[in-house]
Image: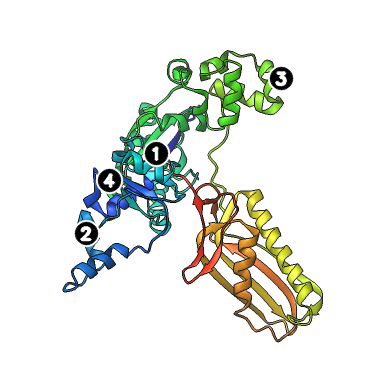
Amino acid sequence: MPTLPRRIAHLDMDAFYASVELLRYPQLKGLPVVIGGGRRQADDLLGKLSAAYPEQEWTAEHLAEIPLEFFPRIAGYTGRGVITTASYAARKFGIGSAMGLMKAAKLCPEAILLPVDFDQYRHYSRSFKAIITDIAPLMENRGVDEVYIDFTEVPGGQRDGGRVLARLIQKTIFEATGLTCSVGVAPNKLIAKMASEFNKPNGISVVHEADLQPLIWPLACRKINGIGPKADEKLKKHNINTIGDLAARDQFWLMDHFGKVYGAWLHQAAWGRDDRPVSMDSEPVSMSRETTFERDLHAVRDRQELGQVFTKLCEQVAADLQRKGYEGKTIGIKLRYDNFQSVTRDQTLELYTADAATIRQVAGQCLKRVDLTRRLRLLGVRVGSLVKQGTEPAVINPPMVAEETGHGIQAQLLFTDD
Ligand SMILES: [Mg+2]
């Protein structure tokens, strides 16, 4: 049987967080909307509405009826909040992901500012991914709003270079969720990722090997996923601005100047070569560390020793998470008493973390909810509800300004969603 040419798709949801909010508040369609800043309770707006019109009962079914004047505007925003997503109408004002809210307030004061609601985004994330795997089962998760899909062996995956299948997936997702996405189909992941941006929003781009020179080489090097700002700056110093410039350089020259591995990779990337498979590696659900004590310890009498072990376990879990690129928001403990009875307790945060101090703090709270009069033979710390780092809020410097409040852990965040 002849081998079919590889056809790999990269599918990226369009302005995902903002688009999900527009489903909930269709009255905001076409208006500049930015997602970011603090996190209010989801029913804040309904609370305002109830206060203004107490004679009527306002529930989640009325979200689409909330008048525009009830929505908070970005004007006058002060603080360090950052935009995660801007609606396409907001982008016309020059507002984009990762921009400070204060700057955005200057560009478009009348923009509507909505808080992030990850539960809602994850719900839609699961929906669109389930639709894709029903049609094309070989899918690789790249975060809450993007995936790679191997079209090669899927019926229709070769037709018109993959365009027919891409259109089917795009249409099915839209009919089921009301959300649009953009798809790039190419011989590999590297090119597919670039191609999905060509016709945003709601676009499809099909790229073949022969398109490398006319379509890819004129692009800036930064368009290659894996060339960051630092590498780009260095490339520019050597007068390498476009991917074509990069392709024109000798591989060994690149290896000399950018290191053996990275230099060789730069050369391959510029020539559109990438053999990485679409991998369905199942994601871990949780990570944990536990230790059995050499002798049973008592929470009060061995307080110091227990405290040290506890801190170390938290640091180890945090290190595991960071090394493997995950963060989680359900933090739990496991104890085994001297009579071999085990108990677990956990607590779910509003925010994802891989930070040892935060894990230690929350696990410490869990510890207060168990019987500590018996001696312990085992102690464990677990972090669950994991997501890939970078797909959820990443903690910025200073690491995490965490404080206990009535509403849980509050923190300053920086995250983006393109
Ligand atoms: Mg996206």
Residue 390, image x, y percentages: 53, 46
Q: Quadrant of residue 297?
A: bottom right
Of circles 4 and 3, which is in front?
Answer: 4
Q: Residues within 10 Å of mark 2 (few under 14, many from 20)?
A: some
Mark 4 vs mark 2: which is more N-terminal? Answer: 2
Secondary structure of the residue carrying numbered label 3 = helix
Tell me the amino acid under the disc marked 2: Ile
**Relative to 150, 72 lies left or right:** left
Q: Earlier in the sequence, mark 3 or mark 1?
A: 1
Disc 4 + disc 3, Cβ < 8 Å: no
The residue positioned 51% from the left and 54% from the top of the image is 412
Which label number is shown at residue 96?
1
- State the residue position of label 2: 66
The colour scheme applied to this rendered structure is rainbow
**Residue at position x 71%, y 59% in the image:** 316
The residue wearing badge 4 is: 110
